[in-house]
Amino acid sequence: MMPSRRRVIAALFAPGLLVIAALPGFAIDVVHLQLGTLEGVGWSAHAVSVQLNWLDERHAGLVLQAQRLALPEGLGELSAVTLLCARAQLTATEVSCAQGTLMAQSSVLGAQNIRTTFRYQFDTGRIDTELLGVRMYDGTLSIKASLSDTHWQVVVRGAELSLPAVTRQLAATGFAIPVVEGSGHLNVTANMSGVASQLGKADVEMQLLAEELSDAAGSIAGENLDVSLHAAVTVAAAGTQVVLDMTGRQGALYVDPVFIEMPAQALRLSASFDWLPTAELVLQSFVYRHPGSVQLEGSGHFKLAADTPLRELQLEIRQAEFPAFYGTYLQPWLYDSVLADLDTAGQLRGSLHWEQGKLSQVSLDPVSLSVDDRLGRFELESMNGRLRWSSTTMPVRSELAWASGSVFRVELGAACLAIDAGRDYVRLVQPVAVPVLDGALGIDVFQLEFSEDTGMRWQVNGLLEPVSLSQLSLALGWPEMGGKLSGVIPDVRYDNGNLEVGGILRMQVFDGEVTLSNLTLEQPFGLVPRLQVDARADNIDLEKLTRTFSFGRIEGRLDGRVDGLDMESWRPVAFDAEFATPENDNSRHRISQKAVDNISSIGGAGVGGALSRSFLRVFEDFPYDRLGIRCRLENGICDMGGVAPATDGYYLVKGRFIPPRLDVIGYADRVNWDTLIAQIMAVTGQQDRPVE
Amino acid sequence: MKMLRIPVAMTLLLIVAACVTINVYFPSEAAAQAADRIIQDVYGERPGETAAPVEPQSRLPDGGVTSATHALLDWFISPAHAEADISVNTPAIRQLQASMEKRHQQLAPYYKSGAVGMTRDGEITLRDQKLVPMQERNAVKGLVSKENADRSALYKEIARANGHPEWEADIRSTFATRWVSNAPAGWWYQNKQGAWEQK
């Protein structure tokens, strides 16, 4: 062969591309070259051969083959590589092919049959090529590339790529992305350019369409999704800068535990961050817009290799709209708390700041925010103010006001609190009076502490200014009672779910006084609230009491005590109670026929039974000496007693000696409590209704 | 010899007396029956419809008495450890049961689909959330969490109502078995090793 006539200058391999440059000649029609092994940075081709069939002075048929082509890491290898060009054009300056075919078996992408064009300029070394119909991820890819000694540019267009296949492949190559199953597709256009083997810039447009997709655990899932993403990447020695813009137009997305339905105005996430060579992520800024629900903004700094990757994060809640924000972003985290089931309204603004992996500052401003527990336990309407917390030892001032509210359906009025908060405590700055029905709860001291070891505990000292019992009983669904409830609350402590009331609660009721002491309440908002209390009643006006409970009129006074009252779910399970006419009581003692009948009917033939009443029916009421009842409840059984022992029983009502004398004597020692209550309810016309 | 007999007799008496106190043990059969009553009410079945018969269970009392000695003493003092009945009739237990009965209507489809399964510690868990439509997942998580809170409270209340708070763990394990025994075929449960099986 004569080198002067045919100068095979170069055989150049780039991934998926080979160019043969030659000067034209006629003496030999067929040139066959065995090039053996060719190697470059990151790639190697084995058993390479080139064949040229000269067609005319400027054109030749080109066949280039390689048995094996190893590609840079992650791209696998190609075997049985054949590049065909039926009519390649060869001039003094370039070789080009307008219609070629590349066939290969890829270890990653399977068998490929790709249409290709290429052009190689000898003087500049520039290569332009286009690969069409690359089959990849169940879809097709087209690649347009221009490579020169100094620069390269590649445009990749992918259509209908299978999202499950893409995620599988990327995860297998070592990308930290979840592998999804289902029916998602991706359309991608990526425009990349760079110098030598280095990526300089990339501009990626991506559209994700998915009818249904989910990862293996079901913690990420989507339905009817239409999400588009635009990313602009700039690579520099100092780091890689990424500007990202994501828009969710349609469908629903579940990212455990948050479920988002794409709003009509589209969900948007924009972010700009730098990825530094030190494995640090500097989040310059991000904006998350969920129209009708929330707008978040922020910035941050993460060191991914460190023990606490979160170095700093600033999160601004520009505007959170309730109830949408609560339903989508808060409720999923609260399902086992007392805030699990709320009706909400209003707005919230604020910011949160994390440092070294820990929350360091909170600033929340509720704007006409209302919360209403669907189980009716509490409610606060139209909260406004500024709530501040800081992890520093310096206390910060917060203020919170509300227009109205309720606790267990007992109405609270408007109030404004000023609070100082430190790292692990909250304390009331100045005394406050919270209106309760027609009275008020004056709080002198409120102190709350929380720590990871002991949980939350708080303490209140206050004063209950007279609240009318008629309103309170109505609110609680009890029979309407007259009188007032008031008392000093010297020391209410809440610790580990239990509420303990020190001091004495005093009720002015039915012209007498009822005092409550040793009150403890376990799990007041829990499943089984448990109340323990000792009660005393002094000088109760029976006429007022019996009128309230429509029991039949009794005149006189009553003293009593209930020791060790133990209530579960607001129903008594144990107590030792005794009520009786006070000793030396000189008020008028009369009991009506109706009351006698009622006492008699309680407990059927057992508890009460009027003695020889037939002739006494003519009297409307009777004088009595003393009356009283005793009950010690245990295990559902009431151990009964009266005001004095009688033959075979006990006196419930002991008559006077002056006729008409009437005694009511009880005989049953032990009475089933539920039956007793049912009978009392029947007599007084009340529904047996526990407070919930 | 006589001198010896008295200490021997005293020792025997001591063992017997000691054993009487030891023998206040967990009434497993009564507990299983009580559990069945509650569970069948929660599941909303008529008693005996699907429940497998309660296998009698017995336990050795703690206290280092060997089983042979125990068997002997058992014969001597059998009345001392006739199993106590388990009472489940307190307001708290009734309230918890009512709350679980109400919730069961909502949970039943998820038991059936296999999304929710019964754990070996007498609770339930969302074992495969993919079987739950996305928008229902948080609601189901809420149901599961509330159900478990009710169940834990129930076990504690039963132990407490019967005057033996230390029985809580025994009651829980009794219930764990009975929830599965009373469940219809097709529901998923965790076996003793923690693996999931379908009934």
Image (spheres, coloured by chain):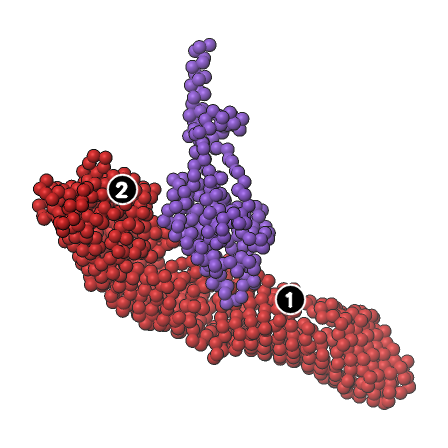
Chain colours: A red, B purple
In terms of secondary structure, where does tag 1 sit?
helix
Residue displayed at 44% across by 57% down: B102
Asked which quadrant contains residue A211, the reply is: bottom right
Q: Quadrant of residue A292?
A: bottom left
- Quarter occupied by the C terminus of chain A: bottom left
What number is the disc on residue B156?
A: none
Mark 2 and mark 1 lie on one chain; the one further toward the N terminus is 1
Q: Is residue A200 above or below residue B99?
A: below
- Tell me if label 2 and label 1 are in contact, CB under 8 Å: no
Residue at 53% across, 47% down: B51
- Depth check, front residue: A452 or A423: A452
A638 or A98, which is in the foreground? A638
> Percent from the top left, x then y, of residue A494?
31, 52
Query: Is residue A215 found left or right of B82 in the rendered image?
Result: right
| Residue carrying label 1 | A168
The residue most toward the top is B1
**Left or right: A542 as drawn, with respect to A235:** left
| Secondary structure of residue under mark 2 | loop
Q: Residue furthest bottom?
A: A57
The reply to whether residue A40 is visible in this rendering is: yes
Direction from residue A689 to residue A67 in the image, left or right: right
Residue at horizontal 53 percent and vertical 42 percent from the top? B54
Which chain is mark 1 on? A
> The N terminus of chain A is located in which quarter?
bottom right
Residue identifier under label 2: A606
Mark 2 is on which residue type?
Gly
In the foreground, B100 or A324? B100
Q: What x and y, as percent, mark residue A571?
A: 32, 50
